[in-house]
Structure formats: structure tokens, C-alpha cells
Amino acid sequence: MPSSDRILIRGGTILSMDFAVGELPIGDVLVEDGKIVAVAPKLDIADCESIDATDTIVMPGFVDTHRHTWQAPWRNIASDWTLAHYFSGLHAGLSGHYRPEDTYIGNLLGTLEALDSGITTLLDWSHNLNTPAHADGAVAALFESGSRVVFAHGGGAPEWSGVPSDVPHTRDAKRIREQYFNSDDQLVTMAMALRGPQFAPGATSEADWALARELGTRVTVHVGDGAWGKTRPIAWMRERGFLTPDVTYVHCCTLADDELRMIADSGGSASVAPDIELQMGHGWPATGRLLDVGIRPSISIDVCTATAGHMFGAMRSALSTQRGLDNAAIEAAGGDASEMDQLKVSCRDVLSFATIEGARACGLDHRTGSLTPGKDADLIVLRADSLGMTPLNNPAGAVVYNGHPGLVETVLVAGKVVKRDGTLVGVDQARVRRLAIETRDYLLSTAHGDPRLADAQLGGDWLPSAYAAA
């Protein structure tokens, strides 16, 4: 009988995202005890489970470095909203009505959705932790999901319902750290999601940062989103010694060029969320400007309230937008973009942003993000036998431009098969859908009793009153 601790993935096109391993037109991947043991053109291994990867692409799982997962039950309600509508409708409105069970199902639905689409590592930027019970529900869902997750503790409605805020980050984060995350070697680990000087200026932000340092976690922070980002938040942080290698800066769209260099000099990482940045007026995605200062960004979904929750669409948006900006810059300088010798950003670049650079931004590049022997086996198998993928002339280009969640055939997390034959393993999807709909309906009913949300409705045409900063 084959050993359940050894899995041989045979005969796929390998996109390892590791220059030392390379890309193989046909190759095998051996997994043992949750680790990648070997990647080679041919491995003759017996006594193992075998997965036939003929006519597929085998690659690392995607890494989403910033998602407000609790909002999953509000899928597409904000597809026609501005950033001001989002702050008003979600943060000053619906967020405050969440029960702990609503936060739980939001996190479970959102994390499973990501896993189903090939995202094996997710940073949950969790800022709807209104009470300790809400935080417990959020964490419970992440452990239940079977995904690799960084739980980034971001406070709740008390800290976010007014911006700028002088409400300090709740110290319940210390309890969460001690109760659930006393080891950084778990599948689910902890970071701190801080508001930073854009949203919690002065002493409040300083207190938040001190808490993160007390807990010994990485930090992820929003900067450079819209007009808030023009207040030079990075310069403010540098003056206080907050720019360190373990900080990830989300968005960066409206930061000044010298602030991007400050981040680069500090060794920090960046997360771009192109779909949301383009829709909600954060500014142009900073992909190219980050590359110019030596920062290879990661990619994030941000919120599924407006856009899709999979990495394929986000990669396309990131790449197409940057190519458009590059072409426009050439034309503005009097050149002809059609005569460029080489495009500035390649499909393989964007794949690296969505995998190994994402792992690096989460502090997990030693464990995941590439098919490197010795790393945990977080990998996905994508079907390449459809009419839209055949013939497979450029595997990286096919993933970025032709890929979609329906191609995700198999998913492994730490060597465990969590999706097989196109279906999540051990997940009661009917239960998850039922609970998500019940949460949506409950919160919508309470919204009608809230004068701030009296006209809340489904159908896609509800526009909350635009939020106005104090």
C-alpha cells in the first residue's frame, strides 16, 4: 500500500519560482512528510501516492498579502462604490453590527474561497474584532480552514468607525498572541495590522506600534491610499524608528518617491492591491515605482466587497496597468511605445510577486512561495488541457493571462491535499454557504434599524452616504 506521507506529482510542467530549480517542460515533484524533497525531470519513486499531472502546470500556491476576509459575505455589494462609500457603508455602518458568529463565517468563507482558487497562504488583515469573542471567532475559522494564514490583528469598529482615530489598538491582541500563537512555526501565525499615522495620528499610532513590538510580531500597515497618503506617513514613521525590515506597506499609491526609497532602504516589503486601488481612487498601483527603487512588491486582493477574490485577476490588473503606465510614459517623453526593445515587467515577474515575493512579505519565504526542496509543500496543480490553454507555448503567460479558478485541480498545503479533482476536501460547502447567507440576511435586517444605514438594500444600487473625514 502506498505511503500516505509520500506524494509524487508526475509529469507536469513545472514553474518552480526558484531560479536554482528552474522551469521544467515536464517534471516530477516529490513530497514527503509535508516537505518538498525533490524536483526533477524524472523521479523513479515507489511506495507513494501518485498524482498524475499530465497536461497540467505545477507551481507554488499563491500568496495574498492583504485581505479583509471578514467582509466575504458582502461580496460585490461595493462593486460600484468609491472609497468614501466603503468607509461609510462597511466601517461606520455594517461593521458595528457584526456578531462573533458573523466574523467567524466571514473568515471561513473568505479563506476557503481563496484556498479553492489556489491561494495557499493568506494574510488576513482582520479589522472587525469588536470584542474578544469576535477575535476568537475569527481565529477559529482560520484554523478550521486548513490554509496557511497570517492572522493580522487589526482591532475593530471602535478603532475604525472614525478616522482619524484616537482610540488605541485593543490590548486583547496580547491575549490572542498568548492563547493561540505562542509558536511562529504553526500553520496559522500572527502579525499586527496597524492603522499607522494616516488613520491614527500621533501618540495613538506610537502606542499601537509599541504594542506590536511588545508582542514581537511582524507589522502590516496601510499607507499611500488616496489623499491620506499625501500626508508623508513614511517620513513620520522614519522619524520614530518605525521603518524596519519586518514591516509590509500596503498600497503605497500616493507616497512620494523619496518615501518609497525610505522603505527600500529599511528593507521593508510592499503589497499592491491593483483592482481595489483602481476602483476606489487610491491612486495608480505603485508596482513600477516600487520596482524603480528596488522593491519587488507582493499582490493582494484587499476586499471582495467590490472585486473578485482570486489571484489570476489581480495579476492581470497589476501587469496590464503597469504596462499601460510604462507605455504612456514613453509616449509623454516623445517616444514610441510600440518600438520598445523589451517590456519592463514580464509575466514571470508578476508570478513571482504573487508567490515568492508574497511569502517574503509575510516573513514566510523560508517555508513557502517556491518549489524549493526543503520548503513546505504548498503547491497547486492547474489544468492546461482546455482549449484556452492549448497549446501550452508560454506557461507563465498562460497562468497570468488565461488562468482562472476553474483550472485549479489540486491544492496542497504543508503536504496535505486540501483540494482534489477540483473539489475542496472535507469541506461542507452547503453549510458554509448557508451560514454566509444567514449572516448577510441578519446584518441586512439590522441595518434597516440603523439610521445611518436605513436605505441599505441588495440589488447593487445601494450607495451609502459618502464618508467625510473629520
Image (cartoon, grey):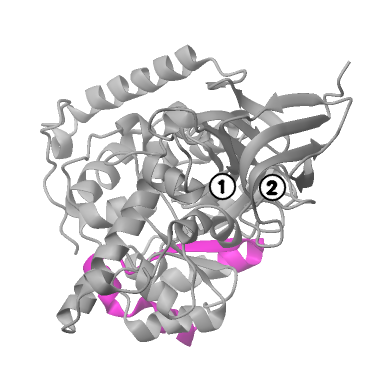
What quarter of the picture does the N terminus occupy?
Answer: top right
* Magenta stretch in the rendered image: 211-240
- Kindly indicate whether the residue at mark 1 contacts the one at mark 2 (C-beta within 8 angstroms): yes
The residue depicted at 12 percent of the width and 34 percent of the height is 462
The residue depicted at 29 percent of the width and 46 percent of the height is 91
Report how far apart the C-alphas of labels 2 and 1 lie in the structure.
9 Å
Q: Where is residue 351 in the image (x, y as percent from the top left)?
A: 49, 54
Front position in the image: 24 or 283: 24
Specify whether residue 419 is painted magenta: no
Specify whether residue 219 is painted magenta: yes
Question: 327 above or below 3?
Answer: below
Q: Which numbered circle lies on residue 193?
A: none
Which kind of residue does numbered mark 2 sit on? Phe
Magenta: main secondary structure: helix
From the viewer's perspective, tell me whether residue 402 is left or right of residue 450. right
Q: Check disc 2 and report the residue beneath it.
A: 181
The residue depicted at 49 percent of the width and 50 percent of the height is 396
The mark total stands at 2
SS type, badge 1: strand
Does residue 127 appear in the picture of this structure? no
Residue 290 quadrant? bottom left
Front position in the image: 199 or 363: 363
Front position in the image: 135 or 376: 376
Q: Position of residue 29 (x, y in %)?
A: 73, 40
Does residue 47 appear in the picture of this structure? yes
